[in-house]
Amino acid sequence: MRQRSFLILLILAVATFGAALWWMNRDTGGQVPDAAEPVTRAEAEAGPETEAAEHDPALWSISDADSTVYLFGTVHILPPELDWYSDEVRAAFGEADTLYLEVDALSPQAQAEMQSMIPQIGMLPAGERLTAKLSEEALAHLERIAERLGMPGEALKAAIDPFMPWLASLQLAVAQMQAAGYDPQSGVEQVLTAEAGEAGMAFGYFETVEEQLAFLSSMPMEVQLADFETGLEQMVENPDMLDDLVAAWTQGDMERLDAIMNEELRESTPEAYEVLIVQRNRNWVPQIAGILEGSGTAFVAVGAGHMPGEDGVINLLREQGLEVTRH
């Protein structure tokens, strides 16, 4: 069973949300239509769990004689009313002179790069239609999703038909989450980037836009289609998964977060887990250790799914002999 793999792909593609949203909101054709009557988060059944919880997302640090590196796992699309910014996180961020993110996805240059790449890697060949490649069950799920978004099923199918499955997945996921009250503009990276810019902080990045987009676009078509159909099923049958993830994150429950984000991916698709989680974590750890070798204070903010577990950034840093403190 691969239900978790779709969520992981979505959450890890967070840095590419800007490109997906740009494509959805273009003035020309090819965008997912706006929902007629979006469901507000106050109306959503699972919303109160996230809002009622005590918000204390996990924060770690490593330090030496002349430097400190704070480590913070992020969620990239959140409800605007969620007050995740704890005093402890705010204080740590206020000490930092450099903000390190997975990728530069928000600058005008990065947006321009993504806009130039999306038509090349996100479109099906001329004459092909995505819905023609889907099973009857998947098409029925699309009808259910269209109903939730307040639009005709045929309109939704026509909107996604030109796209590769990975991009259609992002479009539909973003549309459904926005209809439930989530907002990419409220994601952690958006908030921290804005504050860092106002404070005159420096920026650093672990990956490029091209690398991030390649994680999704380079998958074989049969894998993309399988994940797309799994994602459609998940949107219909388990729409509260993101609420569960955010609740675990705001409570700093890393064991639960690891179970939600990584457990089934590890067990059912170990190859994808190796590429999407393990290899990337191993690539980041030397970079984080290198930051510590410098001087000053840095704040590292990367996807929360990269932090927990044996293959997580925190454990890998400890295996390097670094003392990682949870605050």
Image (cartoon, rainbow, N blue to C red):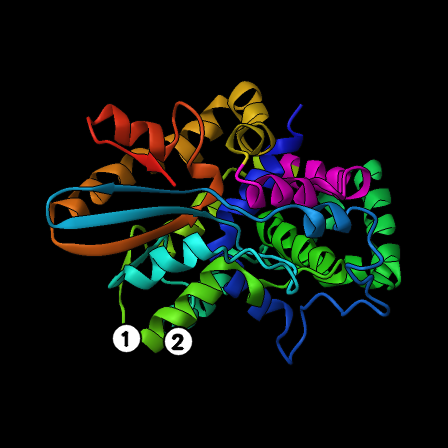
Residue 122 percent location from the top left of the image: 54, 57
Residue 227 is situated, as x and y percent measured from the top left of the image, at 63, 37
Q: Looking at the figure, which quarter contains the C terminus?
A: top left
Task: Locate the N terminus and report the quarter of the image it occupies.
Answer: top right
First reached walking from the N terminus: tag 2 or tag 1: 2
Element under disc 1 = loop
Give the number of the disc on residue 200.
1
Instruction: Identify the mark at residue 108; answer none if there is no mark.
Output: 2
Task: Residue type at mark 1: give it.
Answer: Gly
Tell me: 192 left or right of 172.
Answer: left
Q: State yes or no: discs 2 and 1 in contact (Cβ < 8 Å).
A: no
| Front: mark 2 or 1 | 1
Q: Residue at x 76, y 61 (%)?
A: 179
Q: Amino acid at mark 2?
A: Pro
Q: Quadrant of residue 295?
A: bottom left
Image: 219 above or below 296: above
What range of the chain is rendered magenta? 226-252
> In the picture shown, does residue 4 fall above or below 99?
above
Give yes or no for residue 232 being in the magenta stretch: yes
Residue 7 highlighted magenta (yes or no): no
Q: Nearer the viewer, residue 117 or 51?
A: 51
Left or right, 92 with respect to 166, comes to left
Q: Quadrant of residue 136?
A: top right
Nearer to us in this view, 88 or 125:
88
**Residue at horizontal 21%, vertical 31%?**
322
